[in-house]
Image (tube, rainbow, N blue to C red):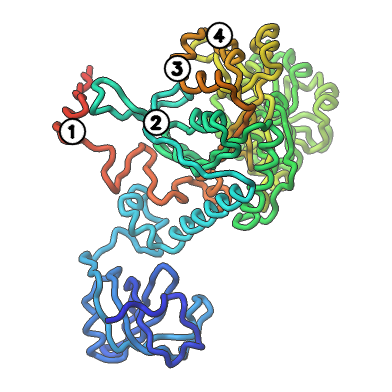
């Protein structure tokens, strides 16, 4: 039989009378009698109805399992019972020949193809090749391909050159665990898969390339979340020479909105320039450095009017409050809200209301009655307002109030805009912080960022007061990317690392290529790397990042389809000088 002449989504009423050959998967059969049935043939492009009208033709398919691949040669005719639910709903094909191309040898499928999204996730991932046959699943991957193609085209139009950087490199302290690759030719030494092309793209700037980008694979040995896939992910990595923060912002504000507008599940997208919010203001106003600006609620400081109210959990603590109108939740709903906030933040929240008579009721109201006017004025309360309250050390209170704000936005539709993408830049991050585990001064984010104020700031300011030219791009409460103006001056780099206890020799040893390259004269440069996976997840409106990755790992970083990670042959371990030491169980 000749190759297919048309796809299963292509034929129309204008093709009536034509001789055609189709090929695809045997989707299902509605058998009416021994010589009449309606077969649905499905391929990547759509479905076509094939009408079986003879016993001979029925005999060819009635013992065939669904999902076998077949070729159908026949004549197109107008369909008597037309339907507009499929693109080919006005026609059908009367076959003269059916050939089995690839037989499905299983009578039972692990799930019905069209309903695969209802199956257990591990089952879906084990049979991902079947899951991807479901048009609803497949279309997400198709959309991802189109989005990536548009991103590439737009970056090229903005004068960026796509350059690939190495996958096998050296281990680098970039905040997450490396995946290590043992070297066969160099016993006891290891390559590492790159957590990001950070050093290579900066070296490209030092090499004289002006604008670089790539859809870069990144590898981090970290746990899964709804918005993070374990193992590997992809980012739109870019860097610009002779550029600063606003140059990066302008490019991203040109590149991203058209893609979100063209493919997004929501119609409205923030216009450039995106709102700029300092890191300090973000924590103070929204309780997070990833604010969802669709929610119009804000976090207010209530320390002055509540900390000394006599309620023990507030004593000596920072107190933050979120006031909301129109929330009429029952006590059961409020208790569940408070419980959910505690689970997510690790800290308790409290509440009270200002009723229609202007009196405090519920929750902790009895501790606030005597200072009602002061609290009402401080928080700007109106009758009917619900107030959620968090207390603790400043960062704890802010974080808890941020979670509360987000959850109140979810249950109060009047306070959350729908059908939109709200972008913002978080800027002016601290250069340093005190590490939670070490108790010592550490870099807050990227150690290669330029401190605001340069060498003078490093020499004269309290390290915790130094700000960096670092920025995050946030959309609808999801961090799409971090970026920075880079520290391209070796002397400033040495001063910056010295504050965290690393001397000049340490810097030279840990980052020899970059340090030496900068000593030969490097341009000021800046960059960013929005996550492609998170971007597509936002655009499609999916809740799980695994829905938009062709072959994702499960939550435990396992590829249940391929069986990875897996044991390897002992001879392979010998070749790379590795010996397995099984941990002892006490």
Give the Cα distance between marks 3 and 1.
30 Å
Q: Name the residue under label 3.
A: 510
Q: In this view, does 188 lie to the left or right of 220?
A: left
Q: Residues within 10 Å of mark 3 (few under 14, many from 20)?
A: some
Foreground tag (4 vs 2):
4
In the rendered structure, find residue 221 and report the number of the disc placed on it: 2
Q: Mark 4 points at which residue?
A: 498
Counting residues from the start of the chain, the first of labels 1 and 2 encountered is 2
Q: What element carries label 4?
A: helix
| Quadrant holding the N terminus | bottom left
Q: Name the residue under label 1.
A: 572
How far across and down, in percent of the image, does residue 225 sit?
Answer: 47, 37
| Quadrant holding the C terminus | top left
Q: Residue at x 62, y 33 (%)?
A: 241
Counting residues from the start of the chain, the first of labels 1 and 4 encountered is 4
Give the Cα distance between marks 1 and 2.
22 Å
Q: Which residue is drawn at 60% across and 47% down?
A: 155
Q: Is mark 3 on a helix, strand or loop?
A: helix
Give the Cα distance between marks 1 and 4.
42 Å
Residue 315 in sight from this viewpoint: no
Residue 184 in sight from this viewpoint: yes
Counting residues from the start of the chain, the first of labels 3 and 4 encountered is 4
């Amino acid at each position: 039989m000749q190759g297919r002449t048309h796809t299963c989504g292509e034929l129309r009423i204008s093709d009536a009378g034509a001789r055609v050959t189709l090929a695809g998967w045997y989707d299902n059969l509605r058998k009416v009698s021994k010589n009449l049935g309606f077969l649905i043939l499905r391929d990547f492009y759509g479905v076509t109805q094939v009408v079986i009208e003879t016993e001979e033709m029925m005999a060819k398919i009635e013992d065939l399992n669904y999902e076998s691949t077949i070729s159908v040669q026949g004549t197109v005719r107008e369909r008597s019972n037309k339907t507009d639910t499929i693109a080919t709903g006005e026609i059908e094909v009367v076959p003269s020949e059916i050939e089995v191309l690839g037989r499905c040898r299983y009578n039972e499928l692990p799930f019905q193809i069209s309903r695969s999204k209802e199956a257990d996730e591990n089952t879906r991932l084990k049979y991902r090749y079947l899951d991807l046959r479901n048009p609803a699943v497949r279309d997400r991957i198709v959309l991802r391909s189109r989005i990536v193609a548009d991103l590439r085209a737009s970056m090229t139009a903005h004068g960026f050159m796509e350059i690939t950087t190495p996958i096998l490199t050296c281990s680098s302290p970039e905040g997450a665990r490396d995946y290590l690759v043992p070297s066969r030719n160099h016993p006891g030494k290891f390559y590492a898969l790159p957590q990001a092309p950070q050093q290579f793209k900066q070296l490209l700037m030092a090499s004289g390339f002006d604008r670089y980008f790539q859809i870069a694979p990144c590898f981090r040995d970290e746990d899964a979340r709804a918005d993070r896939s374990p193992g590997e992910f992809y980012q739109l990595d870019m860097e610009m020479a002779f550029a600063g923060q606003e140059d990066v912002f302008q490019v991203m504000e040109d590149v991203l909105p058209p893609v979100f507008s063209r493919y997004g599940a929501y119609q409205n997208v923030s216009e450039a320039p995106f709102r700029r919010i300092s890191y300090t203001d973000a924590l103070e106003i929204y309780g997070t450095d990833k604010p969802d600006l669709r929610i119009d609620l804000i976090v207010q400081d209530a320390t002055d009017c509540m900390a000394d109210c006599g309620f023990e959990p507030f004593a000596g603590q920072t107190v933050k409050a979120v006031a909301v109108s129109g929330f009429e939740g029952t006590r059961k709903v409020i208790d569940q809200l408070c419980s959910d906030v505690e689970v997510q933040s690790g800290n308790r929240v409290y509440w009270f209301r200002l009723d229609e008579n202007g009196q405090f009721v519920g929750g902790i109201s009895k501790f606030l009655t005597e200072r009602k006017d002061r609290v009402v004025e401080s928080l700007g309360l109106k009758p009917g307002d619900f107030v959620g309250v968090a207390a603790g050390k400043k960062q704890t209170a802010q974080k808890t109030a941020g979670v509360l704000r987000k959850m109140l936005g979810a249950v109060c539709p009047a306070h959350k805009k729908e059908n939109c993408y709200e972008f913002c830049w978080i800027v002016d991050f601290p250069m340093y912080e005190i590490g939670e585990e070490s108790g010592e001064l550490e870099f807050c984010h990227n150690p290669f960022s330029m401190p605001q104020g340069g060498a003078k700031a490093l020499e004269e300011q309290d390290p915790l007061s130094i700000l960096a030219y670092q920025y995050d791009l946030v959309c609808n409460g999801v961090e799409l990317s971090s970026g920075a103006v880079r520290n391209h001056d070796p002397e400033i780099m040495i001063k910056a690392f010295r504050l965290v206890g690393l001397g000049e020799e340490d810097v030279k040893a840990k980052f020899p290529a970059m340090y030496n390259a900068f000593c030969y004269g490097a341009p000021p440069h800046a960059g960013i790397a929005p996550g492609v996976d998170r971007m597509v997840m936002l655009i499609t409106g999916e809740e799980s990042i695994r829905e938009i990755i062709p072959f994702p790992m499960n939550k435990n970083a396992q590829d249940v389809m391929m069986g990875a990670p897996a044991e390897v042959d002992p001879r392979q371990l010998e070749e790379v000088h590795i010996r397995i030491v099984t941990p002892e169980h006490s």
